Amino acid sequence: MKLLLYILLLTISFDSYAQEPEKIELFTFRSRENGKIGYMNKNNKIVIKPQYATGTYFENNDYAAVSIKNGKTYKFAVIDLKGNYIIPFEEGYELISLNTEIENWILVVKNGKWGYINYKKEILIPLDYDNLGHFYGNLAFAQKNGKYGFIDSNNNTIIDFQFDWTINFGRIQPDGLRYVKVQKESKTGYINNKGELIAPYLYDSAKPFFKGVAVVKKGKKYGCINTKGKVIVPFNFEFITNYKKFIIAQKEFSSENEYYYNRQGEFIRIATKKKK
């Protein structure tokens, strides 16, 4: 399921035409004749013939990840602007992601195991993991033996493998730290990038921190906590928007009344929702 989700997300991005032409020399297109992905230049001249199931855009490194499909199985390769193979299909990778935070690092999957290589095909992080994320603030989530933890770019375990699930750390918050939600026994809490548990495993769902505030769900109601784990908006609401300057909450999703809080959790006012 994880590989299928990655492939679906990649395929969606491949068919998008929102890229900036001045930054990209070649563009993907899908052939009407065979349904395959190829590449053309800004003059609509085909440079690399359509032959791939999926294909990313060429970005800063002048490389793209492409795939072929055999039944339900995908194999990935890396090509240059002339269609030459930098990493051929024969390497056997089941996923290749070039969009990593560290330049020239490539996230790969082979035989169901995740790791990192570079464009010289040198192994940077051994393919030992059951799941592996991108590096943010020099930390990436990793899964091994059914548990999640965090490693650094030297493959050192920085936060022990103890969680049932997690994702990548989010953006830096006003206190200078990053935060991420973690799960144990189907309940969610938060840790910071020091590995400190700042919010216990109490929540049934949780959203990433934004400007020092996270929306969390307990039972059937939503509230908000800060980066200390303190509840700053009570669990009285069916819907909360953590948006820019204010936190806006509704006791019922269909209600016209909106409860406004500042980012410290202080109640400001009740306002009537504007009709569209």
Image: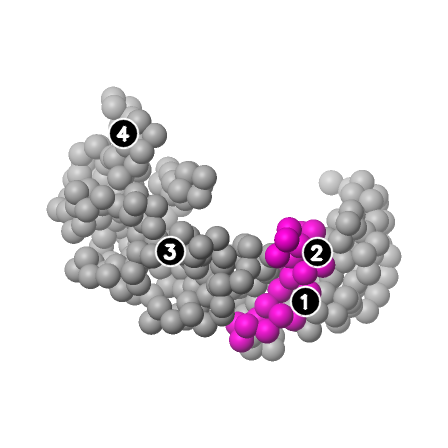
The numbered mark, 3 or 1, whose residue comes first in the sequence reads 3
List x then y, in percent, for residue 182: 58, 59
- Residue ID for mark 1: 199
Amino acid at circle 3 = Tyr
Residue at image point 31% right, 33% down: 73
The numbered mark, 4 or 1, whose residue comes first in the sequence reads 4
- Residue ID for mark 3: 129
Residue placed furthest toward the bottom = 175
Query: Which tag is nearer the camera, tag 3 or tag 2?
Result: 3
Q: Determine contact: label 2, label 1, CB under 8 Å.
A: yes
Secondary structure under the numbered disc 4 in the rendered image: strand
Give the class, few, some or many, for how many residues have Cα within 10 Å of label 4's Cα (few <14, many ≥20): few
Query: Which tag is nearer the camera, tag 4 or tag 3?
Result: 3
| Quadrant hosting residue 155 | bottom left
Residue at image point 27% right, 29% down: 70
Assign the N terminus to one quadrant of the image. top left
- Residue ID for mark 2: 203
The numbered mark, 4 or 2, whose residue comes first in the sequence reads 4
Q: From mark 3 to mark 2, how far is it between C-alphas? A: 28 Å
Q: From mark 4 to mark 2, how far is it between C-alphas? A: 42 Å
Q: From mark 4 to mark 3, how far is it between C-alphas? A: 25 Å
Q: Is residue 13 above or below residue 249?
A: above
Residue at image point 17% right, 39% down: 48
List x then y, in percent, for residue 126: 29, 60
Give the class, few, some or many, for how many residues have Cα within 10 Å of label 3's Cα (few <14, many ≥20): some
Q: Which residues are magenta?
A: 184-208
Q: Determine contact: label 4, label 2, CB under 8 Å.
A: no
List x then y, in percent, for residue 20: 35, 51
- Residue ID for mark 4: 70
The numbered mark, 4 or 3, whose residue comes first in the sequence reads 4
Amino acid at circle 4 = Asn
